[in-house]
Image (tube, helix red, strand yellow):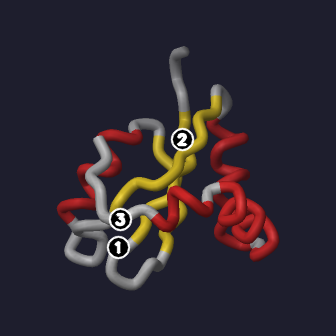
Amino acid sequence: MENVSYVYVLKNPKSRALYYGFSSNLRQRFEQHQKMSKHAGWTLVYYEAYSNEQDARDRERQLKQYGAARGHLKKRITRSLSKGPESAG
């Protein structure tokens, strides 16, 4: 699959806060987050892959703006959110 775009969710293992993001290179973007002081140590708990970039951007916007979308996703990934600290990659 070429030109894949991703929507991803990072979790802060201390506060359990979540961050929703978009990237066309998930591995590189995760590494960038790890170098940022406010996201260092966060774990990748979920991602979705899209063959169309605009679909991925729309999904990211949906997760960031609409509580219902976040709520539905959190229900689907409950076990992933409750896991202890692990490294993604």
Amino acid beneath label 1: Pro
The image position of residue 61, as x and y in percent, is: 68, 61
Q: Are marks 3 and 1 in contact (CB under 8 Å)?
A: yes
The image position of residue 70, as x and y in percent, is: 70, 68
58, 71: nearer the viewer: 71
- Total numbered labels: 3
The image position of residue 72, as x and y in percent, is: 77, 63
In this view, the residue farthest toward the top is: 1
The residues tagged by marks 2 and 3 sit, at their Cα atoms, a distance apart of 23 Å
Question: Which numbered tag is attached to residue 33?
Answer: none
Q: What residue lies at 64% left-to-right and 49% top-to-bottom?
A: 57
Amino acid beneath label 2: Tyr
The residues tagged by marks 3 and 1 sit, at their Cα atoms, a distance apart of 7 Å
List the residue tagged with mark 1.
13
In this view, the residue farthest toward the right is: 68
| Res 48 quadrant in image | top right
Name which of mark 2 and mark 3 comes first in the sequence: 2
Question: Which numbered tag is attached to residue 6?
Answer: 2
The residues tagged by marks 2 and 1 sit, at their Cα atoms, a distance apart of 22 Å
Question: Which numbered tag is attached to residue 84?
Answer: 3
Mark 3: give few (<14), some (14-19) or many (20+) Cα within 10 Å: few
In the image, residue 30 above or below residue 40: above
Q: What residue lies at 28% left-to-right and 77% top-to-bottom?
A: 38
| Res 1 quadrant in image | top right
